[in-house]
Amino acid sequence: MYGRPTPLQLQERRAVGDRIRYLRRQQGISQEKLAELIGRDRQSVSSWERGATPPSLDDLTAMAHVLGVGTWRLFYG
């Protein structure tokens, strides 16, 4: 369960990352500013947007709040 991610999991990570990037840019917020607003570092935001690592549920909730969308939007667009 916690081994290497499957191809589907990697695809889903990238899709979530693309949505984070899109919504962040729509709001005119930099990675650094988003990271500051949710109490993380820019490298974390970059990693999520690239799909390299998945954000935690707490991080997803915080990002959705800052971006003014429901958390579901980060999953389903």
Image: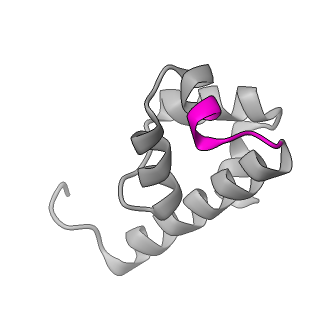
Q: In the picture, residue 19 is in which quadrant?
A: bottom right
x and y percentages locating residue 68 in the rendered image: 83, 32
Looking at the image, residue 20 sits to the left or right of residue 6; the answer is: right
In the rendered image, the residue lying farthest to the left is 3
- Residue 17 sits in which quadrant? bottom right
Residue 25 lies within the magenta run: no
* 67, 77: nearer the viewer: 67
What's the coloring here?
A: one colour
- Magenta stretch? 28-34
Quarter of the picture containing the N terminus is bottom left
Q: Residue 31: x, y in percent?
A: 59, 42
Q: Is residue 32 magenta?
A: yes
- Residue 8 position within the rendered picture, expressed as x and y whole percent measured from the top left: 42, 76
**Residue plotted at (50% across, 44% down):** 45
Classify 53 as above or below 41.
below
Which residue is located at x 65 percent, y 51 percent? 20
